[in-house]
Amino acid sequence: MMKTTRRRLLVNAGLGVGGLALTSLLPGGGLMSAFAAEYVDPLAPKPTHFPAKAKSIIWLHQYGAPSTLDLYDYKPELVKQAGNDIPASFLKGIKTSTQGGVGKLYASKRTWKQYGESGAWFSDLLPNLAKHADDLTFIKASTTIGATHDISVLKLYTGDLNPGRPTLGAWVAYALGSANKDLPPYVVLYSGNKEPQGGSINWSSGFLPAVYQGTAFRPGASPILYLERPELISDKEQRDNLDLLKRLNQQRAALHPEDTELQARLNSYELAYRMESAAPESVDLSKESDATRELYGLNDEATRDYGTTLLRARRLVERGVRFVQVHTGNVEVNGDQISWDAHRDLEDNHRVNAKVVDKPIAGLIADLKSRGLLDSTLVVWTSEFGRTPYGESGNGRDHNPWGYTQWIAGGGAKAGYTYGSTDELGLKSVGKPLDTYDLHATLLKLMGLDHLKVTYLNNGRSERPTVVYGEVFNDLIA
Amino acid sequence: MQKFKFVSYIVLWVAAIVGGIVFAQTVQIDVDQDLMHAIDETNKDINSNISLKDSKAAIAHAKELQDYFQQVETVFKEHGNVDDGVDLAVKARQAAEELAKSASANDFDAAQAHAKDLSSTCKSCHDVYKSS
């Protein structure tokens, strides 16, 4: 069915290697993965199941797992009991597969204060975010599975412990299509100088067509590799080449309407061309005001990197991107490049990591609010798990999948509300816990989607984002 | 059939303070790995059947699950002293029975609710009985 020789000749002669490489980086994966696409325009906007409260999600993954016990979940009893062994009753039903053993209960040197009408607790590590207490919806009974980062991160994104399933952003792109024909519906941003730990599996489309995978935007002025037109080809030459290719492909498509691979390829070429100008513009901060740049902390070396990433996130949702997935990068703590993963030296680790994100996240919320975008943008602050109240290495904390805090804001979430709690020491969730599948089901509902009806037939089986689980937590919805 | 060990960390938590370290005594229960895999796959199939409103396949898979959970119940009973495991196996089997009834009546909303109960029961059991 395919005139490979003709097509390859045209690709090589007309677009050059750069163009070929460019299409391979696009949503849809360019030439090869276009073969997986199913219909003419897989990114055409699609209707919701019910009225959506949110149009976009900005997903703030705090990689390495912050200790929410030292940010939001104030535990006076932990302060009192610090230095003692954790009572056996608190450990009932959990497997403490620690690297350094179960240490003595550990309290960091935090001071705590309640903020806003909601009276939410914040530690001194988040003075800027604390001012938005009444904008946030805390989930203090979060739970997950696993004790290693890679596995729990995979579950955070896909709902499963094994690779192969689509990430939440891919499901959103699949279910809603694109709201901006010039940009991918699912964009991944990261700070720091390397790609997020775990890599592209955490923005994969899994068994969904590759067109729905996340597109990673690199830090810097050129967000996508090989996006710029090759120097030796003028804009007119490139447009003429694309038009010729389009006409030839359209002629063939008219003769063979069953060739959906060709139709998907037509989309990929055109999106690539449009993105040459749209993608750099979407992340170009030169026209942002000084006040906005200051709001995100771009004037401070400590917050400039993450602030830049979040300001880009705002610009992307402003332009209709459905799902912006932001990963924190490593930061320098006492000469080492590390994440929130504070197995030791929690004081220094969290002092630096919190400073990096506090002002930019507060700035993002304030900026979205002032532009009237917070009502339609759901901000999700999340991590793969939390950290234990008992210490590790004397001054760190171990991984805790049994009880930790996440929050959501805007986009129809119940502002100033706290769902659930952990026990008196902050080890386990109390009452009905919210697992990652429940978070996914609830976020999808806010986007106007029923997680049971977002389905895709894979190898004869109807698959859904929440695997065989998932419950909408209506308490979180305004 | 390959066997592997499921380890309970809740049944006999004999946690004691010894030299400042809390430790737990565990109970090992031999459960057929293939059986667990079959339950997992059949549960996914049944959720698919409900989504596709395929009552015939849903009923067939629900019956398979009833049989599987009967086997799990037997394993727990033969082991002894794991009443919570027996209860969860019974609960899962009953959810599969109710699911089959709902599918027979083409009531897929009710079938979905039973499927959710069934999956929750599986999760509750695995919160207690983890693979080693």
Image (cartoon, rainbow, N blue to C red):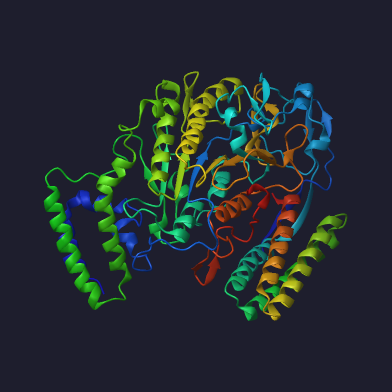
Horizontal side of residue B80 vs B21, given as left or right:
right
Q: Which quadrant would residue A213 be assigned to in this image?
A: bottom left
- Residue A318, compared with residue B70, is above or below; it is above
**Viewer-proximal residue, A296 or A152?**
A296
Q: Note whether residue A338 is visible.
A: no
- Residue B81, compared with residue A138, is above or below; it is below
What residue is shown at x 64% (from left), y 38% (from top)? A416
Residue B76 coordinates in the image, percent (x, y): 82, 60
Q: Which quadrant would residue A65 be assigned to in this image?
A: top right
**Quadrant position of the N terminus of chain A in the picture:** bottom left
Residue A476 coordinates in the image, percent (x, y): 65, 47
- Residue A443, compared with residue A461, is above or below; it is above
What residue is shown at x 65% (from left), y 66% (from top)? B43
**Viewer-proximal residue, B17 or A440?**
A440
What residue is shown at x 64% (from left), y 32% (from top)? A68
**Viewer-proximal residue, A66 or B15?**
A66
Horizontal side of residue A66 vs B30, given as left or right:
left
Q: How many marks?
A: 0
- Residue A409, compared with residue A338, is above or below; it is below
Residue A271 coordinates in the image, percent (x, y): 29, 55
Q: Note whether residue A444 is visible.
A: yes
